[in-house]
Amino acid sequence: MAIPKAELHLHIEGTLEPELAFELAERNGIELPFDSVEELRRAYSFTDLQSFLDLYYALMSVLRTEQDFADLAAAYLERAAAQGVRHAEIFFDPQAHTSRGVAIGTVVTGLARALEDAERSLGISSRLILCFLRDRPAEEAMETLESARPHLHAITGVGLDSAEIGNPPEKFREVFAAARAAGLRRVAHAGEEGPADYVRQALDVLGAERIDHGVRCLEDPELVERLRREAVPLTVCPFSNVRLRVVERLEEHPLPKLIGAGLVVTVNSDDPAYFGGYVEDNLDGVRRALDLDPETVRELARNSFRAAFLDEERRAELI
Ligand code: HPA
Ligand code: ZN
């Protein structure tokens, strides 16, 4: 039995398995530039974040209707439940859909329906986190937040993802301030490919409450000390780091250093359909590769509930 845990770093578009991509392509009359599931899987060989993002954005063209988004989230939640996930905080990228003519309401309504169904049928609680694409203009992020206003009852927070280098958190100061004023929680990808200073900016400029990835914080001991003192959780994604060549081999992953520095570390899957495994696969992978003892694994799972945007009653029930 997989250990009970929360998943806090998961892009719903990154759960699109090749089989479902082909099914949705057929349903929507879309031609994919791949002949088969096998050929598509063979394309999952990445050299960096951008090479992954190119395929990730291309493949999501199959997502068009509310039902497509509901089917995508339902498939993820079923797999997650089988991997011991009791609570999931799910990122989605509205701009990757609105730019193709899919309305934000279609996306949110479809996802939210599947989340509600899974709470009833699987007992998984969940949240939606709207991510801004950092390689798009800041004005577009603000328009996205405005267009999300009618749906904020279904959205817990905002995040920041896509191509990191050259797109510092500073660029999104205003939109994060507006999100905060609207009562939304805040997270941001930082220190994945980008420098440690982006982690500091995410905290100081965006008011980020968790850092997604954050592994490059280790290049700045003062920052590490601050993350420890302020107990800022890091949502680390080991398989992603290896597949996107942030880390060469799982055996060399800095997870033990982050844990050893006293940080609130969690293990997550990021884009499991692309990176070779869901959250329990990641946890089991690092346990073996880094020879983690059972108590360390239990602590990683407890951290996932501590770092989640849960009410205290549900947290106490899960921890
Ligand atoms: N980093 C940045 N953007 C992303 C990622 C990631 O790991 N996954 C999906 N969008
Ligand atoms: Zn991510």
Image: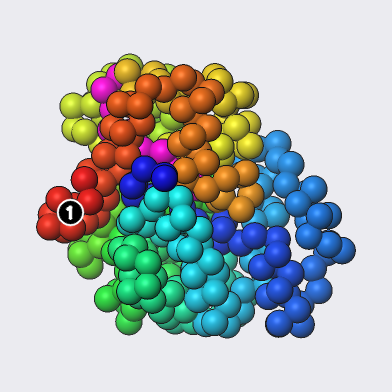
Quadrant in the picture for residue 249: top right
Near-viewer residue (218 or 76): 76
Front position in the image: 163 or 23: 23
Image check: 111 left or right of 193?
A: left
Numbered marks: total: 1
x and y percentages locating residue 108 in the rendered image: 43, 75
Residue at 56 percent across and 58 percent down: it is 15
Q: Is residue 298 left or right of residue 82?
A: left
276 lies left or right of 294: right
Vertical placement of 24 versus 135: above or below?
A: below
Residue at the right extreme, as displayed: 35
How many other residues sit within 10 Å of disc 1, few (<14), some (14-19) or many (≥20)?
few
Instruction: Answer with left or right where residue 270 lies relative to residue 258.
Output: right
Vertical order, 231 against 5 (above or below)? above
Q: Nearer the viewer, residue 255 or 96?
A: 255
Q: What residue sits 49% from the left and 34% below the top?
A: 284
Magenta: main secondary structure equals loop
Question: Tag 1's secondary structure?
Answer: helix
Q: Residue at x 48, y 63 (%)?
A: 78
Over which residues does the magenta segment extend?
261-270
Look at the image and say whether residue 262 sits in the magenta stretch: yes
109 versus 194 height, above or below:
below
- Determine which residue is flagged by label 1: 317
Mark 1 residue CB less than 8 A from any atom of ligand 2: no
